[in-house]
Image (cartoon, rainbow, N blue to C red):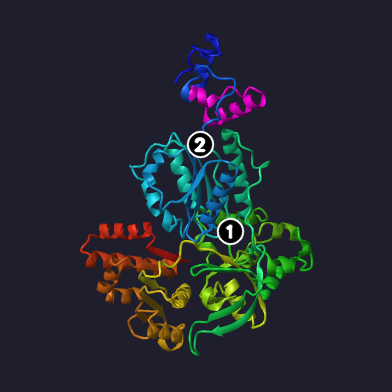
């Protein structure tokens, strides 16, 4: 609506100038102008009110500006994005900014027509795929049904891991699509690697300041949000030193595997966890690998480096990642060498084939000489990320303890033996009485259903870990819901993890059904998905009776095979087309009845 002269404090010339100018201003320019007028004691003129409603007879004191509603959407697989989204919403609300947080699985896509400000916190799953809870929203946004969003302002915080080829792809997908649909970008997209706390905190501050300008609320610098109170918050940067109470190799003599059952004390920590959460272990690099790297570099192992002023050797053992290569790291290394072959590798669109099975030592040995010194070298390395392991105990059963199930990773590549950083540290070095630096990683997206609901657990190998915690919890609480476990490994005799416990749960009714697949015991390899097919009719009956389906383990192969088998079972048993079966599985995901903890 245009500003009218009648009862207006402006003369005709001023009205004409305002009517010519105001429709041409961007949202950011309107915000700036509001702030400028307020700062010059002209707060009786509110630009947004003039544009939206006209200004008949403005009173001496204008009513407060209409608050825009902020919708915080999260796309989260393991809980990081969800936790950040909830924290951001809490901080916005504490500054009197109207905000609500919604999972993309719960958000109705048609509501995009009604939203005003949208803040997206999105992680990327696997090879550039959206998290399970964002699949439907992502699909809708890229469909022809997606509405124009020229009434929306937005910003995106993208979480990822630079060791993956499609770093932060899901966040970029949302950013690109919102822009294509006409939405106004409040801030350029911000990418976060595994150490996301610092860039996320800066994004929070920047967003709060932009939104505060529009609502005349205090900025992030001069307003303090309430903080949570309670015990010590143990994190990757502030872990708890947990004493090792028990360490057992779950595989029998003759097995090709080495699976460690580790029991840790949390006494005095105040740490709590729920079935479905993960335990972060802060690992140390292999000492022999570190010494070989320092020798290849020709550096002084005792040189003080980093802002903590620790020796180079200690920094490489305890703090810095040297076993994982990524394109960003290769690009940084390329600045210190003129080796033509290496420059050609870095120039490739994808370096996935090159980085697989190689580490920093391989690059140093093959592509020198390098022009760096000790300080420059450590400055290009990122911190060792905590390794997350599904917790395999229920706190209701073990009290101030936490159990994890870790498979030792070791293989040969490019003429040298390679080691999983955390798994070999635990399997080969840690003994009873030692301490391990740990923290709990909450995963709100992988939780037990109500006690009376049936649950289907599919977890071969170490994927059994969270289901051991689920079954312990159900035994402790006396849950009445049926439970069905599909477990697989190589050999029955040597690799049947937690066999005695599973048989006891079968006997007392905590576990209703148990199907096992041992792939190397017969000429024809049999996996968990084959056992699912054999039980197709009963599985479909459980699903129709409201069963929740859980999958834990390898994402690239097992999880995809299991999902395809699930689709086939639903199609065959439900007399549905493949497309309808796929849609049915997506509905299960949207309802929170098909949950995955995959890696």
The answer to whether residue 424 is above or below residue 572 is below
Label 2 neighbour load within 10 Å: few <14, some 14-19, many 20+: some
- Quadrant in the rendering for residue 240: bottom right
Q: Which image quadrant is residue 181 in?
A: top left
Where does residue 312 sit, x and y in percent of width and height?
74, 65
Q: Disc count in the image?
A: 2
Give the residue number, with chain letter if any, for mark 2. 68
Residue 335: % across, % down: 66, 53
Residue 542 in magenta? no
Q: Nearer the viewer, residue 457 or 409?
A: 457
Give coordinates of residue 234: x percent, y percent.
Answer: 64, 64
Residue numbers of the magenta segment: 23-51
* Residue 373 visible within the image: no
Q: Is residue 40 magenta?
A: yes
Q: Residue at x 59, y 83 (%)?
A: 246
The local secondary structure at tag 2 comes to loop
Mark 1: give few (<14), some (14-19) or many (20+) Cα within 10 Å.
Answer: some
Whichever of labels 1 and 2 marks the residue nearer the N terminus, that label is 2
Above or below for 381 versus 393? above
Residue receiving disc 1: 194
Question: Residue 430, percent across and down?
Answer: 64, 80
Depth check: 416 or 496 in front? 496
Q: Residue at x 52, y 31 (%)?
A: 27
Secondary element under disc 1, as helix, strand or loop, is loop
Gap in angstroms between the C-alphas marked 1 and 2: 32 Å
Compare residues 61 and 564 and report the one nearer the observer: 61
Quarter of the image for the N terminus: give it.
Answer: top left
Reply above or below: 5 against 315: above
Query: On the picture, is 547 further left or further right than 231?
Result: left
């Amino acid at each position: 609506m245009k500003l009218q002269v009648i009862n207006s404090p402006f003369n005709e010339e001023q009205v004409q100038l305002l009517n010519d100018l105001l429709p041409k201003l961007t949202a950011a320019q309107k915000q700036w102008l509001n702030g400028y007028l307020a700062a010059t004691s002209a707060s009786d003129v509110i630009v947004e009110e003039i544009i939206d409603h006209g200004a008949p007879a403005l009173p001496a004191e204008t009513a407060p500006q209409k608050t825009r509603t902020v919708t915080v959407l999260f796309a989260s697989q393991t809980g990081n994005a969800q936790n950040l989204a909830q924290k951001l919403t809490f901080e916005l609300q504490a500054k009197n900014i109207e905000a609500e947080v919604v999972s993309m699985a719960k958000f109705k896509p048609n509501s995009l027509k009604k939203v005003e400000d949208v803040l997206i916190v999105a992680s990327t799953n696997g090879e550039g795929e959206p998290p399970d809870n964002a699949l439907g929203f992502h699909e809708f946004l890229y469909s022809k049904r997606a509405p124009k969003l020229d009434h929306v302002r937005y910003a995106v915080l993208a979480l990822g891991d630079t060791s993956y080829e499609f770093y932060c792809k899901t966040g970029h997908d949302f950013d690109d699509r919102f822009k294509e649909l006409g939405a106004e970008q409040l801030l350029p997209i911000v990418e976060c690697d595994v150490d996301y706390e610092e860039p996320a905190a800066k994004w929070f501050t920047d967003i709060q300041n932009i939104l505060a300008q529009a609502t005349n609320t205090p900025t992030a610098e001069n307003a303090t949000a309430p903080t949570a109170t309670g015990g010590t918050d143990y994190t990757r940067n502030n872990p708890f030193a947990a004493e090792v109470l028990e360490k057992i190799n779950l595989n029998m003599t003759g097995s090709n595997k080495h699976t460690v059952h580790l029991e840790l004390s949390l006494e005095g920590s105040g740490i709590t966890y729920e079935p479905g959460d993960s335990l972060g272990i802060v690992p140390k690099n292999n000492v022999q690998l570190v010494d070989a790297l320092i020798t290849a570099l020709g550096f002084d192992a005792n040189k003080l480096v980093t802002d903590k002023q620790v020796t180079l050797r200690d920094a490489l053992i305890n703090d810095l990642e040297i076993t994982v290569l990524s394109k960003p790291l290769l690009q940084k290394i390329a600045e210190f060498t003129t080796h033509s072959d290496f420059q050609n590798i870095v120039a490739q669109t994808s370096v996935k084939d090159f980085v697989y099975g190689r580490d920093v030592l391989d690059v140093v040995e093959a592509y020198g000489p390098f022009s760096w010194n000790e300080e420059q070298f450590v400055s290009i390395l990122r911190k060792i990320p905590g390794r997350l392991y599904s917790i395999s105990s229920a706190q209701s059963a073990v009290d101030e303890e936490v159990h994890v199930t870790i498979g030792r990773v070791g293989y040969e590549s490019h003429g040298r033996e390679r080691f999983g950083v955390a798994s070999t540290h635990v399997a080969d070095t840690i003994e009873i009485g030692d301490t391990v630096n740990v923290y709990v990683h909450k995963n709100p997206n992988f939780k037990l259903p109500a006690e009376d609901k049936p649950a289907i657990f599919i977890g071969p190998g170490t994927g059994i870990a969270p289901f051991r915690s689920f079954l312990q919890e159900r035994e402790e609480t006396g849950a009445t819901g049926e439970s069905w476990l599909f477990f697989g490994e190589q050999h029955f005799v040597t690799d049947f993890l937690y066999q005695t416990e599973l048989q006891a749960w079968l006997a007392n009714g905590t576990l209703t059904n148990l199907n096992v697949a041992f792939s190397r015991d017969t000429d024809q390899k049999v996996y968990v998905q084959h056992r699912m097919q054999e039980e197709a009719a009963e599985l479909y009956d459980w699903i129709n009776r409201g069963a929740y389906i859980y999958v834990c383990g390898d994402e690239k192969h097992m999880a995809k095979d299991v999902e395809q088998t699930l689709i086939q079972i639903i199609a065959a048993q439900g007399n549905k087309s493949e497309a309808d079966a796929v849609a049915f599985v997506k509905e299960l995901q949207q309802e929170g009845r098909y949950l995955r903890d995959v890696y």
